[in-house]
Image: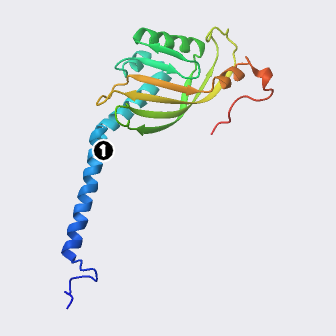
Amino acid sequence: MQNAREGPSGLTRKRFIGGGIATAAALLKGSTDAKAASGGDDLKQRRLAVVRRHMTTENRDAFRDTLGTFETPRYEFIATGELDNGRKAVARYYNEMRSAFPDQHTSDWRMRYAPGEGHDRDAVVVEFLFTGTQKGVFRGLPPTGKKVSCRMTAFFFFPKGSDQLDDERVYFDAGTFLIQLGVISKFYPGWTGPLPH
């Protein structure tokens, strides 16, 4: 005769509950291991805060504070192949951008946390809108007085276990900049770049 506490498959309530607890424990352990591998929630929150501080101080032209978010200052610009490596090179980039686009501003930040796999670094990925008016020389181009508005994506990389940046890698469409600055507008009459989202 079947035990009153035993289901049709012979699974008792005690075994069912015990199995459920074991499964939950295994899932929790896996989740905990994954968090430990990427430094945990506390490190994640500190890194997100560092990136927010980085972008906020850039908007305020407080570039000394922006530099302070780096362990080793480094910018990579994929669209142009340019690399600013080291404190002096990055400070020079900041000064050039402030001179070329004194009203530069980033907005509509969309931030995501991206743990690296294996030996890959962890990153915070930010999509944003860059706007500014070219009132100074930009990459050899004399001031045009034209406004630019360009969607960009930046990958902010962190060394393992650290909440200080060691690299910012920026992706954007160089054609959008050049068209809006009037450099290559004749090739695409009437087009001023991607529509805002």
Q: Residue at x 42, y 34 (%)?
A: 124
* Quarter of the image with the N terminus in it: bottom left
Q: Foreground residue, 147 or 111?
A: 111
Q: Is residue 171 above or below residue 134?
A: below
> Which coloring applies here?
rainbow
Q: SS class of the residue under badge 1? A: helix
Q: Quadrant of residue 160?
A: top left
Q: Is residue 136 left or right of residue 62?
A: right
Say which amino acid is labelled 1: Ala
Closest to the observer, 145 or 163: 163
User: What is the quadrant of residue 51 in the picture?
Assistant: top left
Q: Tag count in the figure?
A: 1
Rendered view: 110 above or below 102: below
Residue at the image point whose x is 67% and y is 11% from the top: 143
Local crowd at mark 1 within 10 Å, few (<14), some, or many (≥20)? few
> Where does label 1 land, which residue?
34
Residue positioned 55% across, 23% down in the render: 78
The front one of 31 and 193 is 31
Asked whether residue 62 is in view, the answer is no
Residue extending farthest to the bottom is 1
In the picture, which quadrant includes the C terminus? top right
- Judged left or right of residue 95, residue 177 is right
| Percent of width and height locating residue 13 | 21, 76
Q: Is residue 77 left or right of residue 144?
A: left
The quadrant in which residue 119 appears is top left
Residue sitting at x 36%, y 17% = 72
- Is residue 114 in view from this perspective? yes
x and y percentages locating residue 33 in the rendered image? 26, 45
